[in-house]
Image (tube, helix red, strand yellow):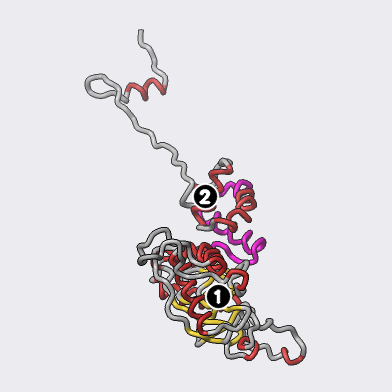
């Protein structure tokens, strides 16, 4: 009796080798990716923790910037289900401009670029970026004389020269210029980056001995912030202030300038630490390299020539 095979059975019979064995066929597998084209990256929801890490990785934003907007960015990513790097950066940029008033993705990119530069070039580039972001190069305001508001003296876009009579008389301004260099007073929203020069302004006139003593304290405090240099000889720019130079990129001092600032204030009050041995000479045990001012300590403000200014 002849048995008729179905179409599927007939196809199966053709899938044999000469010895009667079945051959093995391979099948293409579906590919899934979270990177690449938007089509490939459109996936189901991912854990929020993974999405937060994706935002940090693809944009380079960290710290307060990341904390301020990442929740909103992740929420938008989850709604769009598009986790491509391009979409992550686009959403972060849009939300950052709305929430922070600037583009955090662009700033992160600039920080990365500056980190690749030699320190001196980065110093000048960063100063230029600060000036540009403050609007100091904006076109002259021809209506100012008609009563419109102008930037206050001493703001980042209106620095006051140290030759100004007000500075020479001891008035404090947030931003001053001395011999072509702009100095910013350290305060909230102004953080030193890799300064090459430091300006100290006191709340009373400084005699030569005071200037020499405080500059020595400045150099001592800088060495507590890293294994770098101390301070150069002081250059007096007003009766109340002086400038010292120091490459804070050496020994990692630029990463610990908050420690320098705190230690400088402590040393000015208490002096340098008490010596525990006679290594500095016979009879020096129990003495200090620099004596503090105690209750007569002058108040000071610290200025740097290389800072990051928040808008």
Residue at image coords 54%, 81%? 182
Residue 143 pos. (x, y %): 72, 90
Camera-side residue of 159 and 293: 293
Residue density around tag 1, few if under 14, some if 14–19, many if 20 or more, within 10 Å: many
Residue 211 on the magenta segment:
no
Is most of the magenta stretch helix, strand or loop? helix
Outermost residue on the top side: it is: 1
* Residue 303 - label: 1
State the residue position of label 2: 54
Identify the image quadrant of residue 18: top left
As drawn, is 55 to the left or to the right of 281?
right
Question: Between 35 and 106, which is closer to the camera in this rendering?
Answer: 106
Farthest front residue in view: 283
Q: How crowded is mark 2: few (under 14 residues within 10 Å), some or many (20 or more)?
A: some
Numbered label tally: 2
Using the rendered view, name the quadrant where residue 134 is placed.
Answer: bottom right
Q: In which quarter of the image is the C terminus?
A: bottom right
Q: Does the magenta stretch include residue 79?
A: yes
Residue 180 x, y percent position in the rendering? 50, 86
* Quadrant in which the N terminus is drawn: top left
In the image, which residues are magenta? Answer: 77-106
Local secondary structure at mark 1: strand
């Amino acid at each position: 009796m002849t048995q008729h095979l179905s179409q599927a059975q007939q196809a199966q019979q053709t899938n044999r080798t000469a010895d009667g064995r079945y051959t093995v066929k391979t099948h293409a597998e579906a590919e899934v990716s979270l990177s690449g084209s938007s089509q490939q990256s459109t996936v189901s929801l991912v854990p929020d923790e993974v999405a937060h890490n994706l935002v940090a990785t693809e944009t380079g934003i960290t710290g307060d910037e990341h904390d301020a907007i990442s929740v909103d960015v992740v929420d938008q990513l989850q709604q769009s289900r598009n986790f491509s790097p391009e979409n992550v950066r686009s959403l972060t940029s849009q939300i950052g401009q709305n929430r922070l008033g600037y583009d955090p993705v662009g700033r992160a990119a600039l920080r990365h670029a500056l980190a690749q530069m030699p320190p001196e070039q980065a110093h000048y580039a960063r100063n230029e970026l600060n000036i540009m972001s403050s609007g100091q190069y904006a076109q002259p305001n021809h209506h100012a004389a008609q009563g419109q508001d102008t930037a206050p003296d001493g703001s980042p876009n209106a620095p006051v020269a140290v030759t100004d009579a007000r500075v020479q008389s001891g008035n404090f301004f947030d931003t001053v210029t001395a011999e072509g260099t702009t100095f910013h007073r350290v305060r909230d929203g102004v953080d030193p980056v890799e300064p090459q020069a430091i300006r100290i302004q006191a709340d009373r006139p400084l005699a030569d001995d005071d200037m020499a003593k405080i500059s020595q304290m400045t150099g001592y405090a800088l060495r507590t912030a890293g294994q770098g240099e101390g301070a150069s000889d002081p250059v007096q720019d007003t009766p109340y202030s002086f400038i010292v130079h120091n490459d804070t990129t050496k020994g990692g001092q630029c990463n610990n300038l908050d420690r320098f600032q705190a230690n400088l204030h402590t040393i000015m009050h208490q002096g340098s630490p008490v010596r525990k041995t006679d290594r500095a000479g016979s009879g020096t045990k129990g003495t200090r390299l620099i004596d503090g001012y105690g209750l007569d300590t002058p108040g000071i403000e610290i200025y740097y020539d290389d800072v990051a200014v928040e808008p």
